[in-house]
Image (cartoon, rainbow, N blue to C red):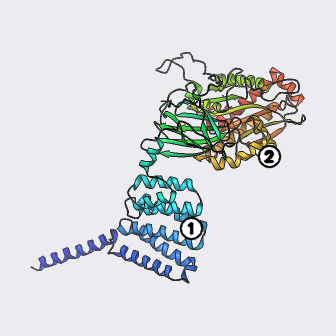
Amino acid sequence: MLIRGRTCLAAFMACIILLLFTAESYPSNNSEAGRKYSIACERLADLKKSSKKKKYRSYWMDCIHTFELVEKQYPKSPSAADACFQRSGAYFDLYQFNKYSKDLNEAVRSSEKCQAAYPKHEKAPEALSRIIDLNLDYRKDRIAAGRTFEKLEELYPGSTWTGRARTRLGLVSRKRKQEQELRKPQETVIASPESSKETGVVKSIRHWSGGAYTRLVIDQDKPINFQAHELKDPDRLVFDLRNARIDASLNKEPLPVNDGILKQVRASQFTPDTVRVVLDLASLKSYAAFPLHDPERLVIDITGEAGGPPVQTAQSGQEAPKAETPAQEQPPTQKPEGGGSSGEKLSLSEQMGLKIKKIAIDAGHGGHDPGAIGKYGLKEKDVTLDIARRLSKLVREKLKCEVVMTRDRDIFVDLDKRPFVARSNKADLFISIHVNANRRRSARGIETYIQGIHASDRDAMATAARENAMTTRRLSEIDSELKRMLVDRMLADLSNQNKDDVSVHFANVVQKSLVTTLKPVNRYAVDLDVKRALFYVLINTEMPSILAEVGFISNPDEEKLLRKDSYRQSIAEALFQGIKKYVDTLNPQTAGI
């Protein structure tokens, strides 16, 4: 009996200890977690009632930290989710009281975090609604508010918070929105007298497809003002062109694309002063939309999951001269040399596992666009094409990389299409070759450019304006225009710090090679350094991209040099050495080849 009693007592004590440890590890609302959560709520309630305490940030942070401790110490307790949403609400209350931007940012960040961590909590839709309020009332960012609403509507379509946010944004329900989008366009549209002078006419819609990338261009006769929306079920991108009407000759039937990214493109007169262009999507990873000028057009780049090889331009609208398809050079076929199962010799880039396997070379201008013209009649388009051909040969023969040329003969290729050729062919590097010009005949030297919204100096802006075929005044207007009009991931390559860094490195290596190589044969080879400016040909290339101005054709002495085959060969070899040195930094094992 004594032994049995001791055994029962030991078992009883073991159960007590187990329960104690279990309670600490998995607290309930009635345990320590619930008690601390209640204390935090009481402190916050007292703080809100006290006009004196509300003035001191320390009281607010004490409450916020108490909620944070509950969430961190007892993550498996139901109180953790409650504490998280109370903490985000406290930041919201704190910002309303002191108007500090850091508290506003924390209110948004913590609300997003809580909704993502506890999506089924009753306060999750309220957290998203709070973010919409903050974006509308304080950040004045309607686009961000709209994106949050799309998430709110998708996750919590029946919530009262969704209805409240929809009313705040002045939106109709998803069902009604789809009905409006599908309504038939009116037969006749008459612009009101007040807006007739500003109304633009949508002339045509054209596209190029290649790989996992499609570029769509909407041509209009006046500057474009647009808004973009991403819609679900089915997936669509919708672009509303304000103060616009459709040209009578524009085909009203859908423009079929079927490239694995876009199914088709539809355009209609949505309202008397709005043209709606709908892109029916097959797949979507990202998109960017931006206006270009002279001529006016809206460029839309869509990246998807799949796609086929580059195809010829398709167009809807008035007949217009089409650019010839740019030639795309391929590396010479290697003769079989034993070894591989395929019976073909691997290229050097394949053998060494190079990160740079394909290089896009862009010869500036061409066709009816001569570019800059020297005092003695030398044309920029002829110089750049000759150098590009020589560079292509060096890259293929010495580096054994594939080459994609935007043009290999004297044809005009639209600035819209040049970066498309590089992206659709999955090039790893992009180099655009140009020859500079200046009103001052004495101007001379070499400079290399990378993309930048703000030009490095006045000369850089003048160079970009000339290459973009626009005035410097018009180019200066684009800075604010892009910030105002670009949507979603607009100019993602400019905001991508890693891509920007490698472009800077690429530009510096090429610039140094040009100056070092050409100095012995050209005493005018002044180093004008690496600069930034906004070049259409470099927009949204999504790869290390540079534009090289290899000399001043407006300088009579340099024009004479640029006429010589030997000097053009020197420029091509300088560009090649710069490319090779850049490749060597990525693939050290190729150095010395």
The image shows residue 537 at horizontal and vertical percentages of 68, 35
Q: Residue at x 78, y 38 (%)?
A: 463
Q: Which mark is residue 80?
A: none
Identify the secondary structure beneath mark 2: loop
Q: Residue at x 48, y 75 (%)?
A: 63
Q: Residues within 10 Å of mark 2 (few under 14, many from 20)?
A: few
Q: Are marks 2 and 1 in contact (CB under 8 Å)?
A: no
Q: Quadrant of the N terminus?
A: bottom left
The residue lying toward the viewer, choosing from 197 and 440, is: 197
Residue corresponding to mark 1? 103
Q: Residues within 10 Å of mark 1 (few under 14, many from 20)?
A: some
The image shows residue 43 at horizontal and vertical percentages of 46, 79
Q: Quadrant of residue 429?
A: top right
Q: Is residue 436 left or right of residue 72?
A: right
Residue corresponding to mark 2? 457
Q: Quadrant of the C terminus?
A: top right
The residue lying toward the viewer, choosing from 230 and 404, is: 230
Q: Residue at x 71, y 42 (%)?
A: 534
The residue lying toward the viewer, choosing from 441 and 338, is: 441
Q: Is residue 34 above or below residue 366?
A: below
Q: Is residue 284 visible from the viewing direction of this image?
A: yes
**Which amino acid, mark 1?**
Asp
Q: Is residue 136 above or below residue 460?
A: below
Q: Quadrant of residue 546?
A: top right
Q: Residue at x 73, y 42 (%)?
A: 533
Identify the secondary structure beneath mark 1: helix
**Which amino acid, mark 2?**
Asp
Q: Quadrant of residue 427?
A: top right
The image shows residue 502 at horizontal and vertical percentages of 65, 42
Q: Is residue 543 visible from the viewing direction of this image?
A: no
Alpha carbon distance from label 2 to label 1: 38 Å
